[in-house]
Amino acid sequence: MGVQKSIAYEGLVRPDRVHGSLYTNPAVFSDEMDRIFHKGWSFVGHTSEVPDIGDFRRRQIGLQPVIITRAPDNEVRVLFNRCTHRGNMICAKESGNTATFVCPYHGWTFGVGGEMRGVPQQGGMGKDFDKSAMGLANVPRLQIYRGFIFACLAAEGPSFDSYLGKARKLLDRACDMSPDGEIDLSAGWLKHRFHANWKMLPENNTDGYHVNVAHASLMRAVNAFSAQAFDEEKGDNSVTRDWGGGHTELDFAARYHQSGRPFQWFGGVPAAKMPDYVARMEQTYGKDMAQKHMIEGPPHAIIFPNLFLAELNISFLIPVSANEVIQYYTPMLLKGAPEVNARALRQTEGAMGPGSFLLPDDACMAERNQLGLAAQSPEWLDLRRGLEREYTDPETGLLSSAVSDEITNRSFWKEYLQLMSQAA
Amino acid sequence: MAMPESEIREIEAFLFLEARLADESSYDEWEALWTEDALYWVPRRPDLDPAREVSHIYDNRQRIATRMRQLKSGFRYSQTPASPMRRVVSNIEIAPAGADEYEVSANFMLMELAVQSTRNMNFWGGRVLYRLRRVDGQLRMVVKKILLVDADEPIANLAFLI
């Protein structure tokens, strides 16, 4: 057996820079799948994607195919998409509703909750064949928080609570935009292929520094967008934040409170155009708290490693290889808010996805980063921006900094290093 | 009654003109083909309900104008420079729809070179449903609905004129 040389990650992630090989080396990618996606917690889907008994939807955790299902007992399960006989991917359809999964190879049949129903010519399996032990495998650990489904493919390791930590509040902020306190991801997913390393997505998605430059074309085409500053030197007091655990945020609340107008995060739509939503929010949360929610809007944040709370969108990524990743997007519909949802659909089409006004330019930048990183010199990517002015916010207790600072990148890499340094 | 040959040729010529203007990223000329009640639509599947589900592109006339302004800004990096493209439009079927409109459908295959980043040759294909209207004697485009074969799969940047 050959001796595999292990990579010393401590030498590749420094407080103010990271090494280029972390984006390009296939051996690093392999370690990431093992240590981050196959041993740690990640986002899989949302309970509103399988609302009825028998509903199923295919997903992937790291490189492994799974199925989210709504079992006959009304519980949500996440099952490995692999027949327990010879490994056939048992569910080929993207989503649907079914009573059973039948393997097309030899006819082994499972209920939608994963339990084995039967095999053809069972006598040949021997008298000890125990159907109850041959169901589709469940992921070792599954947790649902306010509809967000997270899974961990390792039976042991950090608890869900320690993984999510304080960032639970970001999920609360998203759900509390609904007068019913619930979101609904039923509008379908846009899927976008990037020829770039997966880590560029969470790094870019809470990066305030690129917006004025990479998205200059949208600022020129749309006045409402150009009014946003993304520049602390021009009075934008938005905040970048490290929530711990690699969870990061670009919070525009302070910017929006400067004028105190609601719905600046929603193209500045006048409150008078959504009277039922405003009334229902006030009913649920009280006048003051409802006003706060409607001014501050939903979060713009990363839940490590693969979930992006993209204001009124939900997005997640599926890694493919060191050089390729797929990003998904859907509108974050709000239960009890049809006036918001009608606009949210059109806003998602404008902002997110391969045909939108924003994301194609992010994809282009990520791909150009990947191409540039093939050059061996300089070896490092510079992430020092804001290092000298970041501070612990006495109100939140969180490390925070200016809108354009790279504190979000640094907090992502802090968690990355911790996970990657574990013995394999 | 069969449609006169000259009318069929006129409609085909319009589709070929629209395809060439899109291929050559001739934004102003392409934008001028649209009526005021325009819909430029790339759904994720043919029977998608836009009131309930999200599409890749669902541009009304105003959003088409914004898209053109963005493309012409000089800073639309995902189309700077514009992708070299050529498409073939074929299998055309034409049905009159009322006094001055036509429902037209056609297959297309498009080669697009992503010169902005990877230089990958992207291959796009599907069926296009057009609604055309005669305005002051000239054909104009009311709806262009593009049904990509891989609309519900992960796709590359769709920042060019499909």
Image (cartoon, coloured by chain):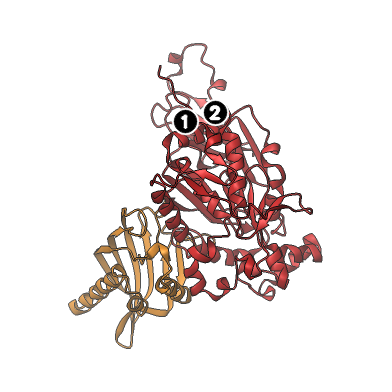
Chain colours: A red, B orange
Residue found 75% across the figure and 64% down from its top: A292
Q: Position of residue B3 (x, y in %)?
A: 22, 76
Give the labeled residue for mark 2: A137
What's the residue type where badge 2 is placed? Ala
Instruction: Locate residue B5: give its quadrant.
Output: bottom left
Which residue is nearer to you in this view: A51 or A401?
Answer: A401
- Judging from the image, mark 2 belongs to the subunit labelled A
User: Looking at the picture, how far across and down is residue A206, in whole percent?
Assistant: 58, 55
Does the rendering let one see residue A213? yes
Which residue ends up furthest to the bottom in the rendered image? B136
Instruction: Tell me: residue B148, above or below residue B21.
Output: above
Comparing B79 with A90, the one in front is B79
Write the residue at 79% across / 53% down. Answer: A394
Sequence-earlier tag: 2 or 1? 1
State the SS at label 1.
loop
Whether label 2 touches label 1, CB < 8 Å:
yes
Query: Which residue is the extreme one toward the top?
Result: A127
Residue A325 coordinates in the image, percent (x, y): 45, 46
Query: Image quadrant for the N terminus of chain B?
Result: bottom left
Q: Quadrant of the C terminus of chain B?
A: bottom left
Dot 1 amino acid type:
Arg
Residue annotated with mark 1: A82
Tell me which corner region of the image, top left, top right, bottom left or bottom right, holds residue A180.
bottom right
